[in-house]
Image: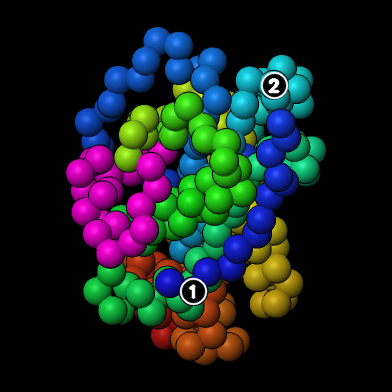
Amino acid sequence: MKLRQQNGAQPTRQRKKTSVAVQTLPPDFATRNVLGSDEVGTGDFFGPITVTACYVSREHFDLLKQLGVKDSKAMKDPEICRIAKKIIPIVPHSTLVCPNEKYNELIAGGMNQGKMKAILHNHALLNVLKRMAPEKPEAVLIDQFAEKNTYYRYLANEPIVLRENVYFATKAEGLHLAVAAASIIARYKFVQVFSEMEQELGMSLTKGAGAKVDQEAAAIIRQHGLETLGRYTKQHFANTEKALHIANN
């Protein structure tokens, strides 16, 4: 999978989820040195899936809290971007962006979104682990989008991140600062790419996959054609057919 990678700082001596079983975390988990990962953009018609893995050690807990790191779903994009710029130089992280053209190619080839996300998470986590070496996190926490066994099955042909002390949990942003920071950085990078798309198309775009998105997609079809729309969207979403109907009527 060809991805756009954005690397983070070196460590010193950052949609709707499928219903899944929740793994119980140790009672002291929030105080551990953790490598966490999260993704954004999976439910957006416009914009790419963006995954960030981030390592947060105890030495950075107080600073990250002072900078406002918390669950990004409770924040607006301007606040997320402001905080992300402050924490990016501090925490070791790796961000992977899957452009929509590549996304559509993978979907057309038979890959589902779950496998795509598993590969992205795994690669981002591996990138951070390589930079940390020989240091290792006390645990890995992945914001859960699939059952643990399903996640590892998706990675059958991939070099896999550590299997020991790897945890999966929904709403993981609220369980450890590592995932909260990862979520903020991922959202920031997503917003950056989203803004670049708006500049290229010369129009404002709406996040998500609602009715307003259909109207905007129809406008792109009328002005630039269906092929151009495909470069900026996830083509298998129902929004494509809705936009075509609007554009042709």
Compare residues 29 and 169 and report the one nearer the observer: 29
Residue 18 occupies which quadrant of the picture?
Answer: top left
Figure check: 49 above or below 90: below
Instruction: Write down the region rendered in magenta.
Output: 142-162
Residue 141 percent location from the top left of the image: 43, 33
Q: Look at the image and say whether residue 161 sits in the magenta stretch.
A: yes
Question: As rendered, which of 82 and 13 lies closer to the eye?
Answer: 13
- Label 2 sits on residue: 59
Q: Which residue is drawn at 44% across and 34% down?
A: 140
Which tag is nearer the camera, tag 1 or tag 2? 2
Q: Is mark 1 on a helix, strand or loop?
A: loop
Look at the image and say whether residue 155 sits in the magenta stretch. yes
Which disc number belongs to residue 2?
A: 1
Q: Residues within 10 Å of mark 2 (few under 14, many from 20)?
A: few
Q: In the image shown, does 181 or 222 lie closer to the viewer?
A: 181
State the residue in front, 70 or 147.
Answer: 147
Tag 1: residue type? Lys
Find out whether the residues at labels 1 and 2 contact each other: C-beta distance under 8 Å: no
Which residue is at 49% across, 42% downward? 37
| Residue drawn at (48%, 27%) of the image | 138
In the displayed structure, would residue 66 be above or below residue 86? above
Q: Which percent across, then down, holds residue 108?
A: 30, 79
Dividing the image into 4 quarters, which one contains the C terminus? bottom left
